[in-house]
Image (tube, rainbow, N blue to C red):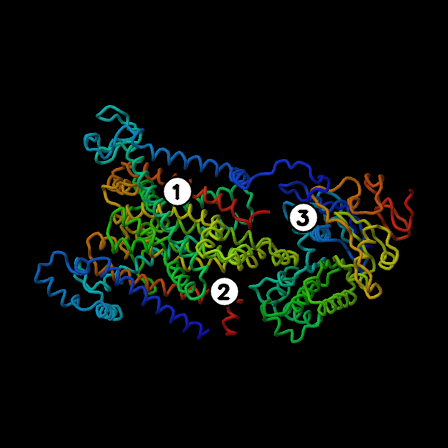
């Protein structure tokens, strides 16, 4: 669009925003996204503060009484406080168990997300920057892996490696790195064709400096979008594997483990043991996805007018 | 076309070979093959014998060739639990899984395409907004949890549908399926819908995006300028263009459905190969696990190949390019 | 009786950034068999005028006022089904980019036969034969073979011939051609113009030829309407307008057409940029780019008739001296 002709040259520019301000303004244009971000913040804070705001440490045997087992929501516990969300088979307060479970679920999701992001984008960057045979081999590998669902790859790996928090993270990273590699390579290819990279080369800057200081920062936008979506995926995937009994152990009770524990009581109508951890899981994933959706819209230059 | 198929077949064979390498080294290098392939209840003498029989005292390269020979002849060893050849066991469970995945795929198309089309044609309509909100929810809902909630609602509270099993089956046109009996259908409904949920969301999004993009294309406007009825503009001009990406993605998603049925089958006790896999995993029945992994790889490769061919049939532009080469 | 009478047509687009008055008071009349050139820069509203006549303005756009009469029948506010009956049948349109107008996944015959069957109960075979003859008439060799092809198998010029053939399939009385040669090679352009003109004369159809290129319509149109910022600023018989342009904008357009007798001279360009349709200047929209503009131009110029058959929206037309 053309500049209005009557704006005099040299007039003080009013309302010029920094890129971050504009990003913030555009992000909060959607009240749904704003709400989702708030919800996500709340969930993370609750998870972080779990030990201080729950009536019970559900994994301290001294605080749990089997007599409190399978109580419906709103029941009064043997030890005096009200279990607003009921209790599970072992007598743990579900509200407390959910907040502790969130800690584990979110940690696993974020840890695997970050590691996959670092590994995947490094590989993608190298492929794009090196080009030639390196790129062909790497991208063939990426395509091959992406032709299988991430869930199946993770399942294969835990089948081979066994259960446990470290193994789950390895499996999730292995299942997801290719998404980052593909994303970064695509935008790095676009970026490295631009003049500023050419200029940096002419200045004789080192490869590492060009790749990490010049190309990478310009690939951040799509990377952030993929990162949010993949982290939500990782959380859901961990919960699924744990529910199937091939993910985390009972001693690492993520939300998926809690839901699995409630499975056996379900037929007798004690829905809450699976229901409330599931709601917590759902809210976490939905809020991340909604934030990711809005990020995609705001950061995608193609959708801008 | 023939050259194209032969080339793709060779590629496919290479992928299977590569994956066999990964599965083999997964089992033999990351894991302990003695743990994995030999019945954990065997005594020392049995283990010695088994190590000899499986060639575990040989060099690793030779072992791989031995494994490959097994794969090629369909010999993955016997299940520790059932005592049957692992491959036979899996093939026996496969029809139930295919039935479930196919039903889910059909549900995804029947529900997803009309909803997505509506949302794409009337993006500002309140119903469209509801559809899109639903599809975000569908993406975010963990399949297994929805399955549990469906059981609580439809089986426990309302008592409308049975919670587990496959129900009665009947043979029709030489195919044995639950879809041919009333009881079987009532058993099929919940797991199929559960498995379809993610795919419905996906189809809605694809169709909507396709419709919104195509709506602004000149050829749609030109079709309207020709005075065609709305039904024909949407049903032929729009839909035929949208169907190319939708069919391609759905074809690939069929493999995904087969793999994801692991979750649904476990919840609804559907006697398919996914449930078999999880049970084998939990009971350390390694030959079955290895056989499942190799079979699913082969199935995926076949599906990818089929989708490529289908794509070239659907899109005249691709078809001609291939003929030209 | 005139084929088309457009009076006070206003089509506005209600975008988030504001109201775009793409067409804001357009009047013209088209007689049977007459060819009218509708000339203007991109964004001047000429294409939207064409779509308005066909009833193909999509949201956020809407016809907010005026009337469009086809053979005396009011089209603004007519039922959708009536508009559909007319489209492609009595009033047809040729689009700008032949690469985009044919559906890539349907064969040519499908796209031609459906255009016939949408308006007439004809057996498929008869429709197919009509389609074949139609292709022959626009100079397509071996039409039977072309009918079985997909659009991407044809060249751009060939595709535009196909769309012209489609437009003429149902012997319409009015053709709206929206820059049908802009996307083509220069050599093909002349052929397409020739074909369109020929079929038009043969069938006695009236035509609105939309273009940004005065040179194209100079040899083609009986009459020229020059559009600027949603309005017709000057109209008249082709020769009059080209020989004795009155509006400064028309003068500017003519000055920027390269031609043999201006060799070696500098081409005059119109200063400034195409106007921002969201924030048009008050009064005459051309005021800020016009050398002849004065205080009077702050008011909106009305339509005057400086000579027989001519219309003008300008306070300071060429050929009439500006009072100092």
Q: Is residue A123 left or right of residue C323?
A: left
Q: Which circle marks residue B314 in the picture?
A: 2
Specify the subunit that label 1 lies on: A
Which-is-in-front pick, marks 2 and 1?
Answer: 1
Q: In terms of depth relative to the viewer, which is nearer, C135 or C38?
A: C38
- Whether residue B204 appears in this view of the structure is no
Q: Do the residues labelled 3 and 1 touch (CB within 8 Å)?
A: no
Check disc 1 and report its element: helix, strand or loop. helix
Give the labeled residue for mark 1: A285
Quadrant in the picture for the C terminus of chain C: top right
Q: How crowded is mark 3: few (under 14 residues within 10 Å), some or many (20 or more)?
A: few
Q: Where is residue B73 in the image (x, y as percent from the top left)?
A: 25, 71
* On screen, residue C221 above or below A79: below
Cα–Cα gap, marks 3 and 1 = 48 Å
Q: In terms of depth relative to the viewer, which is nearer, A124 or B19?
A: A124
- Which residue occupies 79% across, 53% down? C226
Specify the subunit that label 3 lies on: C
């Amino acid at each position: 669009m053309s500049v209005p002709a009557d704006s005099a040259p040299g007039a003080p520019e009013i309302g010029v925003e920094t890129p971050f301000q504009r990003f913030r303004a555009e992000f909060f244009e959607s009240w749904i996204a704003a709400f989702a971000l708030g919800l996500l913040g709340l969930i993370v804070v609750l998870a972080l503060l779990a030990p201080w705001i729950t009536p019970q440490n559900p994994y301290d045997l001294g605080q749990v009484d089997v007599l409190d087992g399978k109580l419906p929501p709103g029941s009064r516990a043997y030890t005096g406080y009200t279990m607003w969300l009921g209790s599970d088979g072992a007598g743990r307060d579900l509200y407390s168990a959910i907040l502790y479970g969130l800690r584990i679920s979110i940690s696993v999701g974020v840890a695997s997300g970050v590691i996959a992001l670092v590994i995947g984008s490094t590989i993608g960057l190298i492929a794009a920057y090196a080009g030639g045979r390196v790129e062909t081999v790497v991208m063939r590998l990426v395509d091959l892996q992406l032709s299988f669902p991430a869930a199946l790859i993770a399942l294969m790996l835990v089948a081979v490696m066994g259960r446990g928090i470290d193994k789950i993270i390895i499996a999730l990273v292995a299942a997801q790195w290719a998404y980052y590699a593909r994303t970064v390579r695509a935008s790095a290819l676009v970026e490295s064709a631009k003049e500023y990279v050419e200029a940096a080369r002419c200045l004789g800057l080192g490869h590492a400096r060009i790749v990490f200081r010049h190309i990478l920062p310009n690939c951040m936008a799509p990377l952030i979008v993929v990162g949010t979506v993949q982290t939500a995926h990782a959380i859901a995937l961990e919960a699924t594997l744990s529910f199937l009994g091939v993910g985390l152990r009972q001693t690492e009770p993520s939300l998926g483990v809690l839901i699995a524990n409630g499975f056996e009581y379900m037929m007798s109508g004690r829905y809450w043991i699976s229901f409330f951890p599931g709601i917590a899981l759902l809210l976490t994933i939905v809020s991340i996805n909604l934030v990711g959706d809005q990020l995609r819209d705001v950061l995608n230059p193609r959708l801008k007018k | 076309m023939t050259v194209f198929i032969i080339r793709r077949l060779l590629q496919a064979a290479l992928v299977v070979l590569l994956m066999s390498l990964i599965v083999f080294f997964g089992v033999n290098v990351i894991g302990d093959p003695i743990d994995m392939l030999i019945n954990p209840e065997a005594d020392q003498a049995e283990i010695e014998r088994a190590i000899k029989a499986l060639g575990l005292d040989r060099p690793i390269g030779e072992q791989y060739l031995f494994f490959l020979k097994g794969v090629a002849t369909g010999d993955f060893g016997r299940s520790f639990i059932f005592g049957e050849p692992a491959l036979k066991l899996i093939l026996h469970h496969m029809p139930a899984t295919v039935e479930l995945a196919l039903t889910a795929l059909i549900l995804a198309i029947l529900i997803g395409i009309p909803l997505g089309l509506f949302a794409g044609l009337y993006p500002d309509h309140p119903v469209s907004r509801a559809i899109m909100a639903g599809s975000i929810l569908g993406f975010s809902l963990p399949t297994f949890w929805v399955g549990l909630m469906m059981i609580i609602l439809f089986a426990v509270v309302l008592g409308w549908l049975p919670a587990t099993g496959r129900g009665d089956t009947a043979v029709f046109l030489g195919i044995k399926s639950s879809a041919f009996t009333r009881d079987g259908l009532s058993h099929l409904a919940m797991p199929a819908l559960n498995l379809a949920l993610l795919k419905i969301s996906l189809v809605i999004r694809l169709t909507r995006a396709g419709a919104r993009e195509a709506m602004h294309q000149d050829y749609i406007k030109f079709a309207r300028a020709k005075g065609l009825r709305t039904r024909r503009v949407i049903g032929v001009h729009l839909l035929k263009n949208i169907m190319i990406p939708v069919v391609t993605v759905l074809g690939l998603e069929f493999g995904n459905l087969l793999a994801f049925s692991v979750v649904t089958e476990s919840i609804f006790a559907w006697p398919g190969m996914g449930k078999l896999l999880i049970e084998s995993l939990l009971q350390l029945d390694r030959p079955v696990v290895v056989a499942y992994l190799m079979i699913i790889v082969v199935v995926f490769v076949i599906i990818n190949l089929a989708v490529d061919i289908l794509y070239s049939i659907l899109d005249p532009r691709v078809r001609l390019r291939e003929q030209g080469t | 009786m005139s084929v088309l009478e457009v009076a006070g047509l206003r089509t506005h687009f209600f975008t988030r950034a504001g109201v775009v008055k793409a067409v804001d008071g357009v009047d013209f009349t088209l007689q049977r068999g007459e060819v009218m050139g509708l000339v203007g820069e991109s964004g001047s509203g000429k294409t939207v005028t064409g779509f308005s006549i066909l009833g193909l303005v999509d949201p956020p756009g809407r016809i907010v006022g005026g009337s469009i009469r086809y053979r005396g029948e009011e089209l603004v506010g007519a039922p959708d089904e009536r508009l559909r009956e007319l489209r492609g049948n009595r009033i047809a349109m040729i689009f700008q980019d032949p690469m985009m107008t044919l559906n890539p996944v349907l064969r040519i015959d499908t796209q031609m036969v459906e255009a016939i069957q949408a308006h007439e109960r004809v057996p498929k075979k008869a429709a197919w034969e009509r389609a074949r003859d139609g292709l022959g008439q626009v100079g397509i060799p071996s039409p039977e073979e072309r009918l079985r092809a997909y659009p991407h198998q044809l060249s751009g010029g060939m595709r535009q011939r196909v769309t012209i053939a489609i437009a003429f399939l149902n012997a319409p009385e009015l053709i709206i051609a929206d820059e049908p040669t802009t996307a083509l090679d220069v050599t093909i352009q002349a052929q397409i113009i020739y074909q369109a003109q020929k079929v038009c004369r043969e069938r006695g159809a009236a035509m609105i030829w939309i273009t940004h290129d005065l040179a194209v319509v100079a040899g083609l149109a009986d009459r020229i309407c020059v559009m600027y910022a949603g309005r017709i600023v000057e109209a008249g018989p082709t020769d009059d307008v080209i020989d004795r342009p009155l509006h400064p904008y028309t003068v500017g357009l003519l000055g920027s057409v390269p031609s043999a007798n201006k060799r070696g001279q500098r081409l005059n360009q119109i200063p400034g940029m195409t106007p921002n349709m969201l924030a048009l200047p008050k009064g005459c929209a051309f005021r800020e780019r016009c050398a002849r503009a004065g205080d009077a131009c702050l008011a909106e110029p009305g339509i005057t008739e400086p000579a027989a058959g001519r219309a003008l929206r300008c306070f300071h037309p060429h050929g009439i001296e500006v009072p100092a």
